[in-house]
Amino acid sequence: MEHIAIMKKSWKLTPKILSGEKKIESRWYKIRHLPWNSIQAGETVYFKDSGEPIALKAEVEKIMQFSDLNPQKVNEILSKYGKGDGLGVYDIPKFFKMFMNKKYCILIFLSKPEKIKSFNIDKTGFGMMSAWITLDSVNRIKIKDPNNEGGLKSNNST
């Protein structure tokens, strides 16, 4: 399977993935959502900032899933894995406030991040607010410009 992670642009995390400063992608939920139970080591995650094309990818090294979270467990996860998640020590209290009432957390350990030729996707059928897409091949939703022999359209930056 291949995955697309849509990142909050204002958090500026995609450059940290590319530089290797961010080695873990975390997802926090009140109820389970993708990629819960649907991602495995060896698979590929493509990353895009919201409103921008996909511009990088990384390989999944390992997965850790946590359930039945409470504020204490959230704090423990952030304390232990926050740096790998690209958070500075001063960011942790802010993220604790955001995540303290979440019940599920998935940590996706990344390896081999690389910049790729950017491309846009068509999220039709996945929901406009989808933050994670899992599919057999990213080529299924990749937008190609027929006039540019496999090039990219620039008018759709989903």
Image (tube, grey):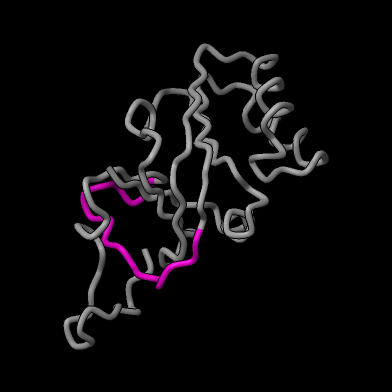
Relative placement, left or right, of 38 versus 97 is left
Quarter placement of the N terminus: top left
Q: Eyeballing the image, is 54 above or below 146?
A: above
Quarter of the image for residue 95 reads top right
Examine the residues drawn in magenta and state their main secondary structure.
loop
Quarter placement of the C terminus: bottom left
Residue 128 drawn at (x, y percent) = 33, 51
Relative placement, left or right, of 127 versus 109 is left
The residue lying furthest to the left in this view is 146
Relative placement, left or right, of 108 versus 84 is left
Which residue is depicted at the point 65% across and 21% down? 74
Residue 106 drawn at (x, y percent) = 49, 29
Q: Eyeballing the image, is 29 above or below 110?
A: above
Which stretch appears magenta?
Answer: 114-130
Q: Is residue 121 magenta?
A: yes
Q: Nearer the viewer, residue 77 or 102?
A: 77
